[in-house]
Structure formats: C-alpha cells, structure tokens
Image (spheres, rainbow, N blue to C red):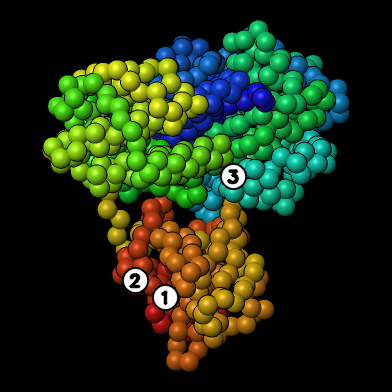
C-alpha cells in the first residue's frame, strides 16, 4: 500500500486563525487523514506555523515584541485552537528552527550549483522616514490591473494578480505612511523560465487529479509566461542566505514556507527521508485558492531543479473562500468567528466542524451565517443523525432493558442492508477523491434512510403485535447506528466516539462496516446534540459582527471577461453557451444572444459579467453568471470595456460583493447606458479607470 503524506497550508503565525482559515486547510486535511487512518493507510499528517518573513517583523514591531517572542506567543495560540477542533496532526511544528534553515539552505545551494539562481539588481521601495527597504507586504497601493485600492505589494487580493511593489499606483509605506521612493538593491532570483521545461513535463503526469481551480490558475500562470522570481528580501527575521555578498538578506518567505513541510517532518521523525525521497509516496496538499501558485509552481520548481529525487505533489485540494455574513472575516474590525471565539461560544467543536465541512467552498465561495449555522444544527444534526441514534437506543432501553436484540432478518431487511452497503462505497469514493462535502452529505443521506426505515417499520406497534419482528428491526437499526459511528469519525470525532461507546465498541474501523458485530447492552448517557435557540444565535450574531447589508451597486460583483468560446444551446434556439475567461478562472454562462450575434462576432469580445449571481439551470445547462447587454428597439448590444480580463467594474466608493445574489436582487439595481457611458444613479460606472461602452450604440436599461 502506498504511503500517504498529507499537508495543510502552514498557517501564518501572526494572528488568530478564523473559520475560513480552518476549512481551507487544516480541517479539510484532518478529515482526509482520519479517513485514511480508518482504512489502514500508512499515513502522516504534517503541519505547523509559518513564522518567517515580513509580516512577523511588522506585527512584532506593533506589539512591542521580538519576532521570536511573537512566534512563541502565537504558536501556542494556534496549537490550542487546533487541539480544541480535534485536528489530528502527526506533527505540528514550526519554520523558525535550525532544521528548517538547514534544509532550506541545502535546497538553495543545489539550485545555485545547478544554474537555476540568477543575480539581478532590483528597483525596490525604500521608506525615507524609516531609512529601510520595504518588503512587499510593507507596501500598499492601487492595483494596476483592477484598480483595487488596497492591493499589497506582492499580490492583489481582489483580482488575484501577482505584483511587484513598484507596479502599485499611489504606493504608501505601511510602516510610516510615507510615500516610498525607488532604490536599487541586488537580489537572488529563482530562474523559473529555465525550470519551465522540467515543470511542464512533471505537470503532464501530475495535474490530471488536481482540483479545477488549481489547474485553471496554474495553466494561467504558464500561459502568461513564467518570469524569474525574487527569493531574497532585505529583512532580518528569516532564513539567512548562505551566499557571499548576500549575508545581510534572508530568503523570501514564499520560497522557504513550503520547504517547511519537509523541515517539520524532518524535525518530527527520524525516518523523514523515507517520506520525502520516495517516488511511491503520494503527497496530498490542502489549501485555500490564494496559495495555489506557490504549491503548483514555486515549490515543485524548487524541488525539481534541486536535482534530488524529492517527493512531489500528487493531488492538490484547494478551496474557494468562506466569507462571513455579507462581508469578509476581519480581525481588525471584529467581524467573523475566529478560533478563540468558537472555543468561547459554548457550542461543541463537532457542531462547528459539521457546519464548516457541510459548507466547504469546494467549487465556489460560500458564506458562514449564524442563521444557517442554527438551521444546520437543528434540522440536520439534531433532527437527522441525533434523532436516529437517540430514538433507536431509547427504544431498546425501554423495550429490552438496554439489551441489544437479536432476531432473524426478513428479505426486506436484507435488501435494505445491501443497499446501505452500496452507500458506504459511495462515501468511500468521495473521500478517496477528497470530495469531503459530498462524502458528508452522503453519510447524512444514510442516516436519513435509517430514519425512513424506522418510520416505515413502526417498531412501537411491532413491540406489541410482533415482538420478534420488532427485535429484527431494532437490530438492523442499532447495526446502522454503529456503522454511522464509524462513517462519521473523520468528520465528527467526538460524536463518533460517543456513538460507538453507546454500542460497546471504541475501536471499530472502516472494515467493520456492515458487520453484525453489535452485541451486549447499550450504555447511552445523553442526547448527541442540543438544539440552538434563537436567543443564543442572536447573542452570537451580535457578539461576532452583525450582518452588514449591502444595497444598490454594492450588491454586485462585476468584472471584465473575455468570451473564448460560443456554442449553440442543444435545447434552445435562442440561447448560447459561452465560455468566458475571468483571468483566474473560466466559467460557462448561458445567454439569449443567439438572435442578435453570431458566435464569430462574440468570440474575443471583452464583456461585462455579473460574477456573483446565483448559478441557474437554463434548459438543462448551469449558467454561472450573466453577461450584461442593452436592448433598444430591435437592436441589442453587449457592454464592452478595453480593460484587462478580471478588471473590477466599480463606481466611486463601491466595494465588490463576495456573496451570491438572486436575479431579483440584480434586477433591483438600476444600471443605465447613456451617450457617454454607463451609470448607476448619477455615478459613472467604469472598468477600473476605463470607460464602458455598449456595442451598436444601444442606450437604455441594462439587463
């Protein structure tokens, strides 16, 4: 059996992780690791805090601590939170260790020896007030691609483009507020163009099993052309650069952070080389989508060009974003649920685990809302899984004094159990593919089938009219309860332990599913889950940042997209299926343009698309967005903009909405095309700094 090595993106040490951080990496990886342990895989789950780099220095300054003191403080904060959430790391380490320095420096030395490191002078931002060069994250300004005004010097969180600080418009030093000046400093670069052939050959065999957003984003990087990437910084805190002339620099944190997976394994296990130098080891990596390029481009490029036979990525499981209510998690604004908030909420860890995994943003952004949290707990955990377990065991307590009944099963029972075994295989299929949300939904479906079986057989009547039949029904049900205790273990470990303790088995694993091994006397102590009332939800909602209603233009998330392909809808003459490119992803949308444009006229157009519209099925095809146009008489023209793909469409003072909206909500936003452009009320709507025009000169209401 292949060895399975699981990693989750190393959480940055300078802050308290929030629920979006948890589901994007450590919790998702935990479910996958627990499942593999249950089926007997030889597995290690490795994680730790990412402690080097700019943000550590910056936060340490703000808190009056040394970088080491800050890392020591937050390492314990992270550790406590993950322990409360029952994250089952085999090792949870750190990157501020000598072992990490040693391995990072050895990889660099091989890259340098093999000719994949180059030296270049860089024009960098320099803070004249602080008298120091500014690392990327110490600079903020306007993104040149989408005009987002709070882009960081290394990446725009709005459009996803990787940046250099010198590209920002109106840059500002985060340390002093001064306008930085450009100065020259000599740095080391990873020669990605030279490594590209190795990377592309490697990807041919590896990328087929990656998540869709990982493939799309990586292919986008390759299509744009890889550029040499700077791997050193003018900082004091980090891994020292072991090269003459660069003694006062450290490695850029995104060069050394992924190497942390290796160094943490090496510090934790003597046999670490058996995991990191074995082509048979399958490496599964879990992360949010913002980390994808570093795991599919930078890290594998470093390992391939190093020349040794490193274990490289087998499968990447990357999520979209989990947002909070109608905005984003924000520690500074006290909005959202952070790990310490969950601990202090008075609600069990398994309830949070269930909600996050049920709401895992696998293919699109999802939203944490307290109302939905309450409904999922009350209507699913309490009314489905908890209901089946509690009433089955209560019935056995009352009717058989707690003794698990045994009786002959009829054909109906055997068919039911056979079908249930098929459901087990479906759960396993989803978990092997790391489709964790679908696996959980399948388990809850099995629980629902158990409740239906209970209702259909009416044991409360059978116990009077046909006691032997009642025994058979209750035996089937208690066997299913046992199986649910096994199935749910990767997701809800405390709940699983409780269920299995009720039916005399704490060590059952996956191979015990479907086996009639339940015997003896049940020992139920309490109900599995408690209902959460409205008062509790209102209290939590108020305490951790209330819902901020968006109105008008702020409801929308409009972007420039290029139409790359147009097909006729197979079941509707007036509909097209267009494939659009948004820069960091491609989508399919369905539009009613067939009577107005030929496919050839549309391909290549840069149009305006509503990207946060709820997906809708139109004649059997799911449309993920809406292309905007204006109808005037018998003419129809699409909205166009001569701006880069992915550019945010804005009005003065607007902020894009990351949550999905309904078509009804969109219709309430009155956008109008006039002679000189597009308007919302009296405000000019633009694609970044570019004007929006309407093809064919159409004017009027936009829809």
Question: Helix or strand or loop: what does disc 1 sit on?
Answer: loop
Which quadrant holds the C terminus? bottom left
Please give the name of the residue rendered at 35% of the width and 30% of the height, measured from the top-left corner: 479
Disc 2, disc 1: CB below 8 Å? Answer: yes
Q: Residue furthest right?
A: 114
Relative side of 253 to 385, left or right: right
Q: Is residue 102 above or below residue 325?
A: above
* Residue nearest the viewer, comparing 136 with 447: 447
Q: On the image, numbered disc 1 is attached to which residue?
A: 703
Q: CA distance from mark 2 to mark 1?
A: 7 Å
Relative side of 190 to 454, left or right: right
* Residue nearest the viewer, comparing 493 with 137: 493
Please give the name of the residue rendered at 35% of the width and 63% of the height, measured from the top-left corner: 662
Instruction: Estimate the x, y position of residue 651 in percent, counting from the top left.
Output: 41, 62
Please give the name of the residue rendered at 76% of the width and 44% of the height, measured from the top-left corner: 204
The label shown at residue 207 is: none
Please give the name of the residue rendered at 44% of the width and 67% of the height, measured from the top-left corner: 617
Question: Helix or strand or loop: what does disc 3 sit on?
Answer: loop
Q: On the image, numbered disc 2 is attached to which residue?
A: 667
Q: Is residue 504 above or below residue 39?
A: above
Question: Helix or strand or loop: what does disc 2 sit on?
Answer: helix
Q: On the image, numbered disc 3 is attached to which residue?
A: 211
How many numbered discs sit on the rendered protein?
Answer: 3
Q: Nearer the viewer, mark 2 or mark 3?
A: 3
């Amino acid at each position: 059996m292949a060895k399975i090595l699981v990693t989750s993106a190393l959480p940055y040490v300078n802050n308290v992780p929030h629920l979006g951080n948890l589901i994007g990496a450590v919790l998702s990886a935990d479910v996958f690791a627990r499942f593999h342990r249950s089926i007997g895989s030889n597995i290690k789950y490795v994680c730790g805090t990412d402690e080097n780099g700019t943000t550590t220095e910056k936060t340490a300054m703000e808190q009056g601590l040394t970088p080491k003191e800050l890392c020591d403080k937050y390492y314990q904060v992270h550790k406590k939170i993950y322990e409360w959430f029952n994250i089952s790391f085999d090792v949870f380490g750190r990157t501020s260790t000598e072992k990490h320095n040693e391995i990072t420096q050895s990889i660099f030395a091989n890259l340098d020896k093999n000719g994949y490191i180059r030296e270049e002078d860089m024009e960098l931002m320099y803070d004249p007030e602080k008298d120091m060069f500014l690392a990327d994250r110490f600079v903020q300004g306007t993104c040149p691609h989408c005009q987002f005004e709070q882009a960081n010097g290394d990446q725009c969180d709005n459009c996803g483009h990787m940046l250099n600080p010198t590209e920002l418009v109106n840059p500002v030093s985060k340390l002093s507020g001064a306008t930085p000046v450009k100065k020259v400093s000599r740095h080391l670069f990873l020669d990605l163009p030279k490594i590209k052939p190795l990377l592309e050959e490697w990807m041919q065999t590896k990328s087929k099993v990656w998540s869709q957003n990982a493939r799309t984003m990586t292919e986008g990087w390759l299509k744009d052309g890889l550029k040499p990437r700077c791997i050193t910084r003018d900082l004091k805190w980090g891994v020292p650069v072991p090269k003459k002339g660069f003694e006062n620099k450290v490695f850029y944190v995104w060069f050394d952070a992924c190497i942390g997976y290796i160094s943490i394994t090496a510090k934790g296990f003597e046999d670490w080389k058996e995991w990191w130098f074995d082509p048979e080891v399958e490496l599964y990596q879990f992360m949010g989508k913002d980390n994808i390029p570093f795991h599919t481009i930078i890290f594998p490029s470093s390992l391939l060009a190093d020349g040794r036979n490193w274990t490289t990525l087998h499968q990447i499981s990357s999520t979209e974003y989990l947002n909070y209510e109608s905005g984003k998690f924000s520690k500074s604004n006290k909005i959202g649920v952070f790990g310490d908030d969950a601990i202090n909420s008075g609600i069990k860890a398994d309830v949070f685990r269930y909600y996050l995994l049920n709401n895992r943003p696998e293919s699109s952004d999802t939203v944490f809302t307290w109302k939905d949290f309450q409904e999922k707990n009350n209507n699913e955990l309490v009314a489905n899984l908890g209901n089946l377990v509690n009433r089955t065991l209560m019935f056995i307590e009352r009717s058989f004094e707690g003794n698990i009944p045994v009786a002959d099963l009829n054909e109906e029972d055997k068919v039911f159990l056979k079908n249930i075994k098929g459901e087990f295989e479906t759960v396993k299929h989803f978990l092997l593919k790391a489709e964790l949300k679908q696996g959980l939904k399948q388990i809850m479906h099995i629980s629902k089938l158990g409740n239906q079986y209970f209702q259909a057989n009416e044991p409360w009547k059978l116990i009077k009219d046909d006691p032997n039949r009642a025994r058979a029904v209750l035996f089937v049900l208690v066997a299913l309860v046992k199986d649910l205790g096994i199935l749910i273990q990767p997701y809800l470990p405390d709940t699983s332990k409780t269920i299995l303790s009720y039916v005399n088995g704490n060590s059952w694993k996956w191979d015990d599913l479907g086996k009639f091994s339940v015997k003896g006397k049940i020992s139920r102590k309490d109900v599995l889950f408690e209902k959460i009332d409205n008062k509790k939800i209102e209290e939590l909602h108020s305490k951790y940042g209330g819902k901020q209603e968006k109105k008008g233009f702020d409801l929308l998330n409009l972007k420039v997209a290029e139409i790359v392909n147009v097909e006729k809808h197979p079941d509707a003459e007036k509909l097209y299926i267009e494939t659009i490119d948004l820069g960091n992803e491609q989508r399919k949308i369905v539009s009613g343009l067939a009577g107005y444009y030929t496919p050839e006229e549309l391909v290549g157009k840069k149009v305006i698309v509503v990207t946060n519209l709820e997906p809708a099925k139109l004649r059997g095809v799911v449309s993920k967005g809406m292309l905007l146009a204006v109808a005037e008489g018998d003419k129809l023209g699409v909205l166009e903009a001569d701006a880069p793909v992915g550019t945010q469409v804005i009005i003065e003072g607007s902020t894009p909405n990351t949550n999905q909206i309904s078509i009804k909500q969109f219709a309430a936003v009155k956008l109008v095309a006039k002679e000189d452009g597009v308007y919302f009320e009296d405000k000019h709507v633009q694609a970044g700094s570019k004007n929006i025009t309407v093809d064919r000169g159409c004017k009027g209401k936009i829809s």
